[in-house]
Amino acid sequence: MSTSVDEAIRTLLLLMPRLIGRAKRTPPPPELESFNLAPRHLSLLAYLLFEGALGVNELAARLEVAPATVSLMVGDLSRKGILARREDDADRRRTIVSIAPGHHAAIDGWLGRGASAWRTALEPLTPDQRRMFVDTLLTFERAVGGGEA
C-alpha cells in the first residue's frame, strides 16, 4: 500500500505531538527527581549509559556543543553525585566522565525503556531502512531548526 507525501505528513503531524507528550510525561525515577534534569542532560546521560565512560571532548563532539558547555554540565551533575569524574591515567589533562555507580541502575531503567522501544521499532528493518529512517529524522531536525544542527 502506497502512502502519498501529504498522507505521511498528516500522520506524522498527528503522531509527533503524542510522542513528545509521552516522552515529557515519562518522569525520572524517584531517586533522580530532585536533580531537575533538563533535556540536554538526558543526551549526555544516554551517551554515557550506552557507550560507557567518555572524555569531555568526546562528549562535546557527540553532543555537537563546545567542550566548555560539556564541562559545565559535567561539573553540575558531578556536584549532584550523578556523574563521576577522573583523570585519564595516560593523559592527566584529560577528564574521563562516567555515570556514578549509585545512579547507574536508575538511569539505565529510565533511559533503557526508550532504547527498548526503539529496538522494537528498528529491529525488523534492514540496515539500509534503519539508515534511511535515521537520516530522515536528522533531515527533519535540520529543516525545523532552520538549518541548524
Image (spheres, helix red, strand yellow):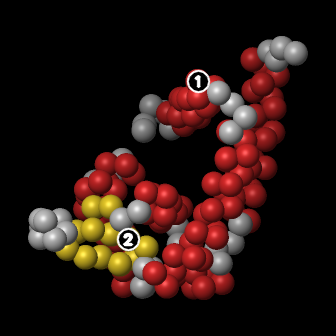
Q: Please tell me the numbered disc located at residue 128.
A: 1
Residue 46 is left or right of residue 120, and the answer is: left
Above or below 65: residue 94: below
Q: Amino acid at mark 1?
A: Asp
Q: Are there few (<14), some (14-19), or many (20+) residues within 10 Å of tag 1?
A: few
Q: Residue at x 69, y 31 (%)?
A: 125
User: What SS does tag 1 mark?
Assistant: helix
Task: Look at the image and tell me in which quarter the N terminus lies.
Answer: top right
Give the residue type at disc 2.
Answer: Ser
The CA distance from mark 2 to mark 1 is: 32 Å
Name the residue: 53% across, 34% down.
Answer: 138
Classed neighbour count for the residue bearing mark 2: other residues with Cα under 10 Å, few (<14), some (14–19), many (≥20): many
Q: Picture coordinates of residue 146 (x, y %)?
A: 48, 33
To which quarter of the image does residue 80 belong? bottom left
Query: Residue at 41% of width from left, 63% of height from top?
Result: 52
Residue 131's image quarter?
top right
Q: Is residue 127 above or below residue 117?
A: above
Q: Which residue is mark 2?
A: 98
Q: Position of residue 67 (x, y in %)?
A: 26, 58
Number of numbered discs visible in the structure rendering: 2
How far across and how far down the image is residue 126, in percent? 65, 27
Q: Could you tell whether 51 is left or right of 23 in the image?
A: left
Q: Which is nearer the N-term, disc 2 or disc 1?
A: 2
Please say if 52 is above or below 9. Answer: below
Q: Name the spot of residue 78 as percent of width and height, x first.
A: 36, 80
